[in-house]
Amino acid sequence: MTVPPASPDPESYVVGIDFGTLSGRAVVVRVRDGEELGTAVHEYPHAVIEHRLPGTDGELPPDWALQHPADWREVLRTAVPAAVAAAGVDPARVIGIATDFTSCTVLPVRADGTALAEIPQWADRPHAWPKLWKHHAAQHQADRINALAHARGEKWIARYGGKVSAEWQYAKALQVLEEDPEVYAVCERWIEAADWIVWQLTGTESRNACTAGYKGLHQDGGYPSEDYLAALHPQFADFARTRLEHPLAPLGSRVGSLTAEAAAWTGLPQGIAVAAGNVDAHVAAPAARAVENGQLLAIMGTSTCHVVNGATLAEVPGICGVVENGIVTGSYGYEAGQSAVGDIFAWWLRQGLPAEYLAEAETYGEDAHQLLTRKAAGQPVGGHGLVALDWLNGNRCTLVDHDLSGVIVGLTLATRPEEVYRALLEATAFGTRVIVEALEGGGVPVTEYIVTGGLGKNALLMQIHADVLRRPVSLAVSEQGSALGSAIHAAVAAGAHADVRTASAAMGRVRQAAYRPDPQRADAYDRLYAEYRALHDRFATDGTLHRLRRIRNAALAAATGTAPTAPTDPSDATQPTDPSEAP
Ligand SMILES: Nc1ncnc2c1ncn2[C@@H]1O[C@H](COP(=O)(O)OP(=O)(O)O)[C@@H](O)[C@H]1O
Ligand SMILES: O=C(CO)[C@H](O)[C@H](O)COP(=O)(O)O
């Protein structure tokens, strides 16, 4: 007989930590009602390592994105004690801690969890470093993974929409093996940062069911077979058995206790519950009360992830993945996403706003996003004459191709910065509509659209989403959706709530239908969406963007004297790559 947990102590607390792309955020939450009492942020000093490794002169090739594990550990040392101090609670009343991470952010480690990047002997080898989710230099490996899976009729490939993303861990690990076999040889475990950070807290390895399912291709109780992996590369045969295999922990389960060392870092009591790791997107669902089948949660920030539960298993082309119990127990969890959203808007701001714009922002006390949003808000739909493709960081769904790039059509000498900004906001909404249509067309009902994440604060963007999707947009109340989601998992791991659904009802909050579609604007957006689709279908298939990528890679390689990143050429997709032979 299962004994229900006692009602939560009215004055006990949990800590949730969200490890994002640029910073880690900790929040202290009351378990009884989800009240957020204190929060703190630690910006990663090394941010995203895209050009050169710390302490070296060597240039990284294009499309690389690495991170520093020390930055992550520092979040435990700084943001957690700061959040507890801000909350003004007695740390002795904190009963559990949980973490979530960007994904697939993944790293090679020794058997005891030591990151290769932190071992002096390996620190100057780029492949020893953690690869951030948006490391896109393994597209060629992803193409081969996909072609071989289809050629062999691997059953699991349909669970990943028919294409595994270059962002997921097999493509990244295969790239290490092929480009730096010595690093691959000393890598004893290959681990998601989501599980590595939990290892730092508990002192023991654990693997969570969410990342193993979505990013580790773990389906129906196992990883891809040794036969399949050997056919990709003979030395890759034992990859899953030797470097991944470990019992999987369900979401919200307790995987260990806070060690004395981690207690000293965080200022929390030694021995409190530590929950299984989780992905920053999926973890947010209970915080936004988006745990019932059909409630699609868009986690909108640097990138956007879309997660939705379904009652049945559907294999939807172009969707990142479906995993049983992948978001909450008892449902099939679906994940889709766009590899850049806020990152696209940030890119446009970096291109240099005219001096008078910067002066105006200063006068009004606005940041550049707020300035361009205000200026764009008054425009009639279509008034800029522009349409853009949201592929500035490749396309994660539904084309699953990171060698695609952005397109803006309709520019004139009269086009103003706020008009391009608005076209980019709209492009991200059109990209979302493609995903929602794919889900529904593939048999996954979407009954409600809910937004969480940093972009929820942009009212124009939210209204554009409502109009483009012709659906009300509900908004999570918490500004720290993922960190609160982690705190909810911590409360379950500590035994304060029976399960994640119950904890969500007690601790999550959402403002229903915060934005409603306007029928006239929705009609106007239908016309623009038809143009977006036409452009989308053309550039997805006509090869222009791939050719441009190849020309860029060859030109950069010639200029720097390095081997070019292997091009995307599906015709040779099953062949192992010798980088020295890439044109
Ligand atoms: N007012 C705004 N409107 C649109 N985008 C914004 C605004 N403010 C910040 N951003 C973008 O939001 C992104 C950060 O989102 P956030 O949710 O805070 O982080 P993360 O996704 O890394 O967890 C950045 O790409 C930034 O450019
Ligand atoms: O793919 C993911 C989840 O599956 C990444 O975690 C995500 O795209 C990065 O998130 P963020 O935009 O919050 O930095």
Image (cartoon, rainbow, N blue to C red):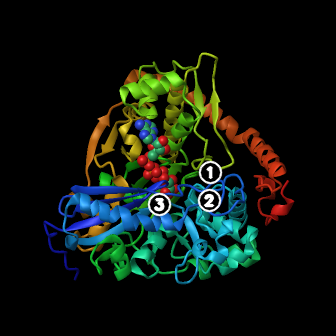
Taking 64 as reference, is 458 left or right? left
The three-letter code of the residue at mark 2 reads Val
Q: Quadrant of residue 500?
A: bottom left
Look at 63% across and 67% down and name the residue there: 170
Per the image, the residue denoted by label 1 is: 400
State yes or no: discs 3 and 2 in contact (Cβ < 8 Å): no
The three-letter code of the residue at mark 1 reads Val
Look at 41% across and 20% down and name the residue there: 378
Per the image, the residue denoted by label 2 is: 164
Placement of 422 over or under 41, stated as above or below: above
Q: Which mark is residue 313?
A: 3
Camera-nearest residue between 234 and 361: 361
Camera-nearest residue between 265 and 416: 265
Mark 3 or mark 2, which has the lower sequence index?
A: 2
Q: Judging from the image, what secondary structure is the residue with disc 1 in? A: loop
State yes or no: discs 2 and 1 in contact (Cβ < 8 Å): yes
Q: Tally the numbered discs.
A: 3
Q: Judging from the image, what secondary structure is the residue with disc 2 in? A: loop
Mark 2 or mark 1, which has the lower sequence index?
A: 2
Placement of 181 over or under 424, stated as above or below: below
